[in-house]
Image (cartoon, rainbow, N blue to C red):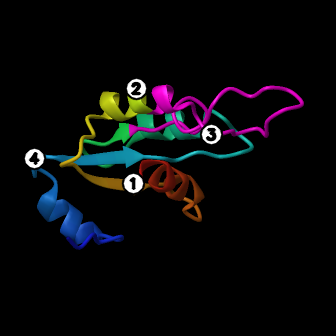
Amino acid sequence: MSIAQLISPERLAMRQKTPGLVILDCRFALEDADYGQRNYAQGHIEGASFADLKRDLSGPVIKGKTGRHPLPEPAALLESIQAWGINADSDVVLYDDGPGMFAARAWWLLA
């Protein structure tokens, strides 16, 4: 099986209604924790769900023990994955509007 790592906007538009396609908006700004949710509410790729760095892609911060975005607990991540509608047959598209680090984190967690 071959897995494509990148998709063009044109190809995504052609596949938008494909069953099993899951699109996640991973926008976030370290200096503004509400940035991603606010921008998602203002507009996003049709059919996309919002993947919040703090809520979905990170675990609880434990002062003196973790960094500011520790890995989520497996059960919590699984809950998010199920809420987004991802299963073993899904094609998942992840995007953000920066250097790609938040979409890359989601990709790494899902891989």
Residue 19 shows which numbered tag?
4
Q: State whether residue 79 is above or below residue 84.
A: above
Sequence-wise, the earlier of marks 4 and 2 is 4
- 10 Å crowding of disc 2: few (<14), some (14-19), many (20+): few
Badge 1 element:
strand
Image mark for residue 71: 3
What type is the residue that disc 4 sits on?
A: Pro
* Circle 1: residue type: Leu
Q: Earlier in the sequence, mark 1 or mark 4?
A: 4
Question: Mark 1 highlights which residue?
Answer: 94
Residue 111 falls in image quadrant:
bottom left
| Residue 60 shown left or right of residue 95 in the figure | right
Marks 4 and 2, how far apart in space? 21 Å
- Residue 99, image x and y in percent? 59, 65
Residue type at mark 2 is: Glu
The question of residue 14 being in magenta is answered with no
Residue located 66% across and 35% down the image:
33
Q: Quadrant of the N terminus?
A: bottom left
Mark 3 in CB contact with mark 1 (< 8 angstroms): no
Q: Earlier in the sequence, mark 1 or mark 2?
A: 2
**Mark nearer the viewer, 4 or 2:** 2
Badge 2 or badge 3: first in the primary sequence: 3
- Residue at point 61% right, 36% down? 58
Q: Residue 44: horizontal and vertical position, in percent?
A: 36, 45
Q: CA distance from mark 1 to mark 4?
A: 17 Å
